[in-house]
């Protein structure tokens, strides 16, 4: 049975609940090892692939993730639609902790990551993908409709600023990102989105706000236990949205 789509889980989502008839796929890629096995299972009669971006035990830091191997693996398994779940800090006033956002733009501040499959080693023809709209409009719309059907509030649109990490940002960096037009800040949204586009996969992001970005909102110091509590609360809505995405009207 073909795989309907894939979820790449971020911080706080290492196993996807409710998958039945599970198979584990260990894929070797020309780009090295992915973050772990891909788990394929059934929800609502549809096959879904799940890959934990940081590894199942959260052992891989954002700047060390093999984004190319991860996206390649999913593509090799026949996936054409990918939803990336990403923990983020909120910059815009309406994007405080526990808010879920379906962003529509990206600014990439990362450095030193492998950002393309156009590599001499693997002799893939050089492609200059159109990335003016970095996320799939169709998949974004489907996610927003699914959230509505599942009764989960999401914010439609926002600019995701991708930073290198693993440290959090300074107030000055966030102030600059705000001036640039970023609404959210996270460490894992790029190059994943661009790599998916290079392989012809539809890709969209569900950004879960874990904390106010440095100097935003209540300007309180960012505390890790709070981040994890907020993420846990937001993550609880993800299976509901994915369930509605797989089984619209079901
Ligand atoms: N900055 C960058 N990445 C993040 C943050 C943040 O404040 N919170 C969760 N991921």
Image: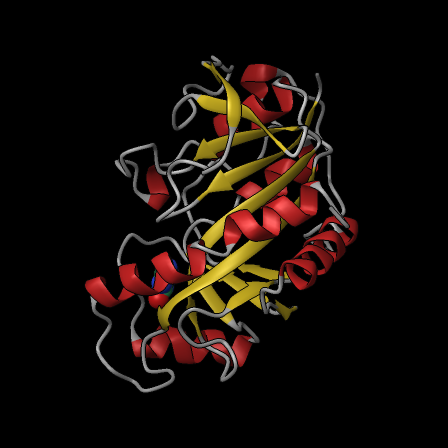
Task: Determine if residue 189 is in view.
Answer: no
Above or below 113: residue 165: below
172 left or right of 183 in image:
left
Kindly identify the residue that appears in the image at 55 percent across and 38 percent down: 7
Quadrant position of residue 141: bottom right
Number of numbered discs visible in the structure rendering: 0
Q: Is residue 114 left or right of residue 149?
A: left
Tell me what residue is drawn at x 36 percent, y 48 percent: 11
Q: What residue appears at the point 49 percent right and 35 percent down from the top-left corner?
A: 18
Compared with residue 118, is residue 113 higher up or lower down, i.e. above or below? below
The x, y position of residue 99, in whole percent, is 48, 70
Front-most of residues 36 and 134: 36
- Depth order, front residue of 60/147: 147
Q: Residue at x 49, y 68 (%)?
A: 184
Task: Give percent across and percent down for residue 149.
Answer: 69, 59
Left or right, 212 with reference to 8: left
Q: Nearer the viewer, residue 202 or 181?
A: 202
Q: Position of residue 16 (x, y in %)?
A: 46, 37
């Amino acid at each position: 049975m073909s795989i309907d789509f894939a979820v790449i889980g971020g911080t706080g989502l290492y196993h996807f609940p409710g998958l039945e008839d599970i198979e584990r796929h260990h894929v070797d890629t020309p780009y090295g090892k992915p973050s772990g096995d891909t788990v394929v299972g059934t929800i609502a009669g549809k096959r879904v692939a799940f890959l934990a971006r940081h590894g199942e035990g959260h052992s891989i830091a954002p700047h060390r993730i093999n984004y190319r191997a991860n996206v390649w693996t999913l593509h090799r398994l026949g996936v054409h639609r990918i939803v990336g779940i990403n923990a983020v800090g909120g910059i815009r006033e309406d994007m405080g902790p526990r808010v879920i956002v379906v962003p529509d733009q990206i600014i990439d501040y990362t450095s030193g990551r492998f950002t393309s499959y156009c590599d001499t080693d693997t002799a893939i023809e050089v492609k200059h993908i159109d990335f003016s709209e970095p996320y799939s409009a169709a998949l974004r719309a489907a996610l927003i409709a699914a959230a509505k059907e599942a009764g989960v509030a999401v914010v439609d649109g926002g600019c995701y600023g991708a930073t290198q990490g693993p440290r959090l940002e300074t107030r000055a960096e966030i102030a600059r990102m705000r001036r640039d037009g970023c609404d959210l800040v996270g460490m894992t949204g790029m190059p994943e989105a661009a790599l998916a586009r290079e392989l012809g996969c539809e890709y969209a992001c569900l950004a879960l706000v874990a904390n106010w970005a440095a100097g935003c909102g209540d300007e309180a110091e960012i505390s890790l236990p709070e981040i994890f509590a907020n993420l846990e609360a937001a993550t609880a809505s993800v299976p509901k949205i994915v369930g509605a995405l797989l089984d619209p009207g079901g």
